[in-house]
Amino acid sequence: MSVQLGVWPQDVPLTLEALAQDLAAGAAPSVELLLGFGPDLEMIETPEAGALPEQPHPATAAFYAELTARFPDLAEDNYLDSPWSEPLTVGRHAVLMSVVFSRSGEVCRLVNHLAIEHELHCFAPRDLPSRPRMTSGP
């Protein structure tokens, strides 16, 4: 079990309300929809620890640098001690994180602190309102 988190700059147009409305309307939650960006985001998986895409947003780059200084990205040599359940996904604007449940408290506190410090939105899928359940028959 893991906890999913994402951060992106506050000056990038995306709101949790707009995302919740799209999901409530039945839109399929693609990566682009979940992040609120089109294909120009060029979302990529970080090929190795410490690597960022070309020309990252300054706030995203600063967040990533501080985060990985405290909790290095998942790699072959640290997987037993890492709080990450999979390597970080880093784009020009966003960083997506999957945190092992047993370490989620300490990591979520740090992510929230760094997001505030770097003026980033922080999103966890649990922040979305519940979707109505489909029932069958009367």
Image: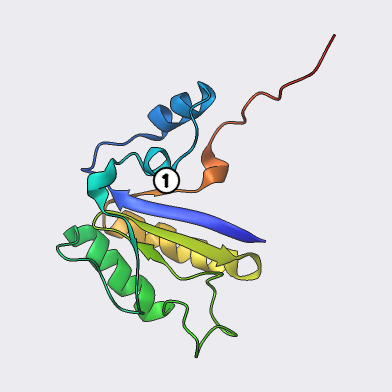
Instruction: Indicate the position of residue 39 as horizontal and vertical percent values.
Output: 27, 45
| x 54%, y 68%: residue | 106
Q: Residue pushed farthest front?
A: 39
Quarter-of-image position of residue 47: bottom left
Could you tell me how many numbered marks the image carries? 1
Q: In the rendering, at what x and y percent does residue 113 appear?
A: 39, 60
Q: Nearer the viewer, residue 103 or 125?
A: 125
Q: Is residue 80 left or right of residue 49?
A: right
Query: x, y (%) of residue 86?
Result: 52, 69
- The residue singled out by tag 1 in the image is 31
Identify the residue at the far left of this view: 55
The image position of residue 60, as x and y in percent, is: 26, 60
Indicate the colouring scheme. rainbow
Residue depicted at x 54% and y 74%: 83
User: In the image shown, does 64 or 91 lie closer to the viewer?
Assistant: 91
Amino acid type assigned to the residue bearing label 1 in the image: Val
Q: Secondary structure at mark 1?
A: helix
